[in-house]
Image: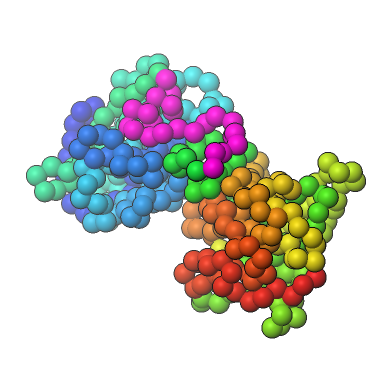
């Protein structure tokens, strides 16, 4: 094993490298990896890989655990000059990084070679770049950087050109703003186009709620590794009136209309219980209101999806961009992806065309096409 002092560098000879933060207590320090151009800035916010964005756009950098990323240097775009490995003290933890005495980054190569870069010289900093992987004369090298910011996470990400969205959610304008990175953990509200990763637990619930003066029904499309799709629902289609609330051998279960609070200001809910296994690629909760339920927009009735892993993480997606059109009957708030590193929530917020009773079509790649599926059987 090679140990790098502060500022020292060494060449690495393999494209497949695992970078791991070591010496920390679970939950005390968060890992952030940036793909940077020659200007030492990200090309877009998607170049920041962390717990809420576990994969770089091209897949060259992949978060495999809370403290570890896998890097495929062959897949790094030519526009990326360096990959920066940084850490920040979790917001719930007091004190600087210097209070973590064994903090380091270890680079493990497929050849078996290991390079470690211990954090050196940090004092009051709450965030720091520990190591960088960079291009030099046609090859890749690693350097121990050990330099940071007292300002913590916000200072770290803005220094590298990332736009931070850590303020409370507000109503969006008619034109959606550019996607920003959500750095929060715990309870998170996503806007359309944002995505977040949460810990994979034994049981996850996807709950759709709305103001109870109308009625919606919820069903879930489930994509399997072999490419076929099953639907957990309480009603069928015009072509096939048969339905089942339980699919995937019990892994996905529609729990029915589990409650409605009395009064005009109450909330009605329907819930889908998800127990992810290796056969499931993704689950797509769908909110639907047939013509027979009367008119009313997703916007008016404030439809919202909440995905809860039962371990303190709750991700919500609201019908924030819904039109005030009373004859739009189907909404897909988000896709729940089953990833190796955890559960990824992708806020797509898609709507059917006006007066359409057709279901969305989920293909073998996980692509959704609204109004391309079978005709819903009116309830």
Q: Quadrant of the N terminus?
A: top left
Question: Could you tell me what secondary structure mostly forms the magenta stretch?
Answer: loop
Front-most of residues 314 and 294: 294
Residue range (magenta): 151-174
* Residue at the spot 66% in from the left edge and 65% down from the top edge: 355
Residue 339 seen by the camera: yes
Q: Is residue 170 magenta?
A: yes
Q: Give the residue furthest to the right.
A: 262
Q: How is the image coloured?
A: rainbow
Compared to residue 204, the image places residue 145 above or below, namely above
Give residue 327's position: percent from left, percent from top: 69, 60
Q: Please, is residue 149 above or below residue 34 in the view?
A: above
Would residue 28 be seen by someone viewing this image from the given angle? no
Residue 352 sits above or below residue 32 on the image = below
Front residue of 92 and 281:
281
Residue most toward the top?
124
Q: Nearer the viewer, residue 234 or 60?
A: 234
Q: Provide residue 344's location: percent of width, then percent of height.
A: 53, 53
Q: Is residue 139 left or right of residue 216?
A: left
x, y percent for residue 290 = 75, 65
Determine if the magenta segment contains residue 189: no
Could you tell me which quadrant the C terminus lies in? Answer: bottom right
Left or right: residue 214 compared with residue 153:
right
């Amino acid at each position: 094993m090679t140990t790098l002092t502060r500022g020292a560098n060494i060449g690495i000879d393999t494209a497949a490298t695992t970078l791991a933060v070591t010496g920390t207590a679970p939950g005390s320090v968060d890992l952030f990896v940036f793909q940077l151009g020659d200007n030492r800035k990200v090309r877009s916010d998607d170049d920041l890989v962390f717990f809420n964005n576990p994969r770089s756009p091209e897949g060259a950098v992949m978060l495999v655990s809370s403290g570890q990323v896998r890097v495929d240097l062959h897949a790094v775009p030519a526009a990326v000059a360096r990959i920066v490995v940084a850490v920040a003290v979790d917001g719930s933890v007091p004190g600087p990084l210097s209070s973590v005495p064994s903090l380091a980054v270890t680079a493990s190569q497929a050849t078996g070679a290991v390079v470690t870069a211990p954090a050196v010289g940090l004092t009051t900093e709450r965030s720091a770049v520990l190591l960088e992987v960079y291009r030099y004369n046609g090859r890749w090298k690693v350097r121990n950087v050990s330099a940071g910011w007292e300002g913590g996470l916000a200072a770290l990400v803005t220094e590298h050109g990332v736009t931070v969205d850590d303020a409370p959610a507000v109503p969006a304008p008619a034109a959606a703003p550019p996607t920003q990175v959500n750095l929060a953990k715990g309870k998170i509200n996503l806007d359309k186009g944002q995505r977040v990763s949460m810990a994979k637990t034994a049981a996850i619930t996807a709950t759709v709620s709305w103001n109870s003066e109308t009625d919606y029904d919820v069903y879930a499309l489930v994509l399997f590794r072999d490419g076929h799709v099953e639907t957990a629902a309480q009603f069928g289609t015009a072509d096939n009136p048969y339905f089942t609330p339980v699919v995937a051998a019990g892994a996905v279960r529609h729990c029915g209309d589990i409650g409605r609070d009395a009064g005009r200001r109450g909330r009605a809910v329907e819930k889908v219980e998800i127990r992810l296994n290796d056969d499931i690629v993704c689950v797509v909760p769908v909110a639907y209101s047939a013509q027979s339920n009367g008119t009313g927009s997703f916007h008016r009735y404030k439809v919202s999806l909440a995905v809860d892993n039962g371990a303190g993480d709750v991700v919500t997606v609201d019908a924030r961009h819904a039109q005030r059109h009373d004859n739009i009957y189907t909404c897909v708030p988000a896709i729940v992806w089953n990833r190796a590193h955890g559960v990824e929530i992708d806020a797509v917020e898609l709507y059917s065309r006006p007066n359409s009773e057709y279901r969305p079509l989920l293909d073998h790649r996980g692509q959704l096409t609204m109004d391309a599926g079978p005709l819903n059987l009116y309830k």
